[in-house]
Image: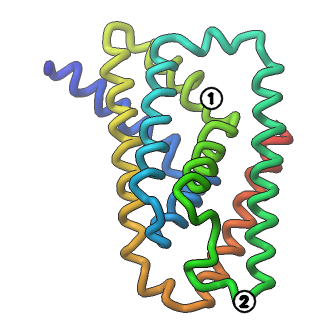
Amino acid sequence: MTSAALSTLLAGLLFGLSLIVAIGAQNTFVLQQGLLRRHVTAVVAICAASDVALIGAGVAGASVALDGREWLLTTVRIAGAAFLLTYAALAVRRLGRPAQLPAGGHGPTSAGSVIAVCLAFTWLNPAVYLDTVVLLGSVANSRGPGEWWFGLGAALGSIAWFVGLGFGARLLTPLFARRAAWRALDGFVAVVMTITAGRILLG
């Protein structure tokens, strides 16, 4: 690897992290599953693989395919907002039922339901197409011959982030041994999901 390629890869890694390291619906879900230690490997794998696929599509020029197809993003926006508001409502419902606050009562439990919810968080978010495919893809393409090194760096950043968030969440286990902590998390989930849904609807 040449010094130019390494520099471009590091630029892609930092740019990718700048887009993904933020409090959002997907990251909140990954954190929640990590705390519960429930199908964490599957959740991390889905999020990381999806990001890698979207980054690859962006570098390959998929952003051009989205031009003039506002109806597609609008459809995703409405479906995504509805999903997030439903998830927020479930979190609020748990707040009013203290008996269901222990870890076993939080969110989807079976592998199939967790995977389905994770896929929804990942692919029903129009921001992922705008940020990862369009924005990151455009920046990568501006790098000329180094576009794929830039994309690789961004992909490595996403993988590292989701692995750290999903498996590192267990370090907070002592804090979440208390019922109040789970109540606070549910409140946080409800707020994040509602705000994200609002942003999606307002475009």
Q: Quadrant of the C terminus?
A: top right
Q: Is residue 113 left or right of residue 155?
A: right
Q: Nearer the viewer, residue 46 or 148?
A: 46
Give the answer, above or below, for where 110 lies relative to 7.
Answer: below
Q: Is residue 185 left or right of residue 177?
A: right
Q: Nearer the viewer, residue 134 or 114?
A: 114
- Residue 80 marker: none
* Residue type for callout 2: Pro
Q: Position of residue 182 (x, y in %)?
A: 61, 81
**Residue drawn 81% across and 65% down?**
89
**Residue drawn 77% across and 85% down?**
97
Give the answer, above or below, for where 143 lies relative to 151.
Answer: above
Q: Quadrant of the N terminus?
A: top left
Q: Position of residue 125 (x, y in %)?
A: 68, 39
* Residue type for callout 1: Tyr
Q: Separation of disc 1 and disc 2 at Cα? A: 38 Å
Compare marks 1 and 2 and give the one earlier in the sequence. Answer: 2
Q: Which color mode does the image show?
A: rainbow
Give the answer, above or below, for where 107 lies relative to 59.
Answer: below
Q: Position of residue 18 (x, y in %)?
A: 48, 43
Within 10 Å of the Cα at label 1, are there few (<14), some (14-19), or many (20+) other Cα atoms?
A: many
The residue at which mark 1 appears reads as: 129
The residue at which mark 2 appears reads as: 98
Secondary structure beneath disc 1? helix
**Residue drawn 29% across and 28% down?**
9
**Residue drawn 63% across and 77% down?**
105
